[in-house]
Amino acid sequence: MRRPATGGRRIGIVCNADHDVFRAVADGLRDHGHEVTFFHPGRPVPERDIDRLDLLANKKVSRAAVEALQYAERTGVRTWNGYYAVLLGARFVGLRALEAVGFRVPPASTTKPDCEYVVKSLVDWYGDGNPHLGGDGEVYQKYVPADPIDDKYYAVDVGGEVRVRAVRARSKLYGEKALLGTVDPDPALAAKTRALLRAVGAQALGVDVVHADGVAYAVDVNPAMSFRGVGMDEDLVESVLARLPATDAVVPDGDADATVRTCGGYSAETRSATSTTTRSSTLPGS
């Protein structure tokens, strides 16, 4: 595969190719001269395809995404919303992380409580069903008697700055999710959302907040938000651009002493050799 136009990089996104927001993000990245490839979140990403990338971005919590991110980070390919970020999709990891940065979180357990509860999956895998009231499942979270409305806080790291916006939506507990419009983020909740993003090294995430009797509760965190209706397409483009390595090392003709531009202490050619060595020494049978 040939490298894109001068200065361009190869970016892979684990996401459905017809996703309206990330299709727009891909177009924005192409406008900057980069090559973008979508990988279906339900299918394994071939290692040879990851080897060709300069950056692998993730938009889904799926087994294929987890394996691809692990491989990318092990072999020196940069990631956007990488392996540690996607771990927030493991329900108890996400809930404990929310508590750690100061959110009030309804208690959750693998055993049914003696009160109303919401049933959720142990991992928020791509393709799994939505949470629901009552019944059987893997995780039981105490139900907060709130209005059937969620405030969804979206955070995006654009490189040195974390921007936060919020939208109001009808809760999926009561039918299909429906966006009701944007709201001004509460400063305290926005600060906690930023703190969570920075704590796990994510580039983008979302927190679902409900209100009951004047108290805000974070009921979930999502490292693979849709970003629909929040107007952060350009922020997402800026965020991915901020994660790209520097342009390829180039030594001008006739200038053997020229300085080589690198990212992370090695050039693209060196990374390629390092990746081969790392993979050979860490993957059985390779």
Image: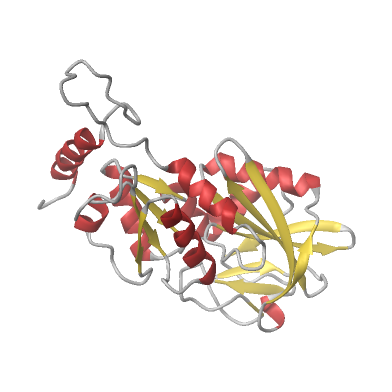
Q: Residue at x 47, y 51 (%)?
A: 81
Instruction: Give the residue furthest to the left.
Output: 285
Is 21 in front, or is 62?
21
Q: Is residue 180 above or below residue 96?
A: below
Q: Residue at x 35, y 52 (%)?
A: 69
Q: Residue at x 52, y 52 (%)?
A: 237
Q: Residue at x 17, y 48 (%)?
A: 283
- Is residue 163 shown to the viewer in this render? yes
Q: How many numbered discs, if any?
A: 0
Instruction: Give the residue furthest to the right.
Output: 213
Place of residue 107 in the rendered image (x, y in percent of width and height, measured from the top left):
68, 59
- Is residue 102 shown to the viewer in this render? no
Is 279 in front, or is 234?
234
Q: Quadrant of residue 171?
A: bottom right
For residue 88, side relative to residue 248 (left or right): right
Place of residue 9 in the rendered image (x, y in percent of width and height, measured from the top left):
33, 47
Is 106 in front, or is 245?
245
For residue 89, side relative to residue 150 (left or right): left
Instruction: Give the residue furthest to the front.
Output: 254
* Colouring used for the render: secondary structure
For residue 107, side relative to residue 234 (left or right): right
Q: Quadrant of residue 192?
A: top right
Of the 4 image quadrants, the one containing the N terminus is bottom left
Place of residue 16 in the rendered image (x, y in percent of width and height, measured from the top left):
42, 71
Is 138 in front, or is 33?
33
For residue 235, side relative to residue 175 (left or right): left
Q: Is residue 206 above or below residue 263?
A: below
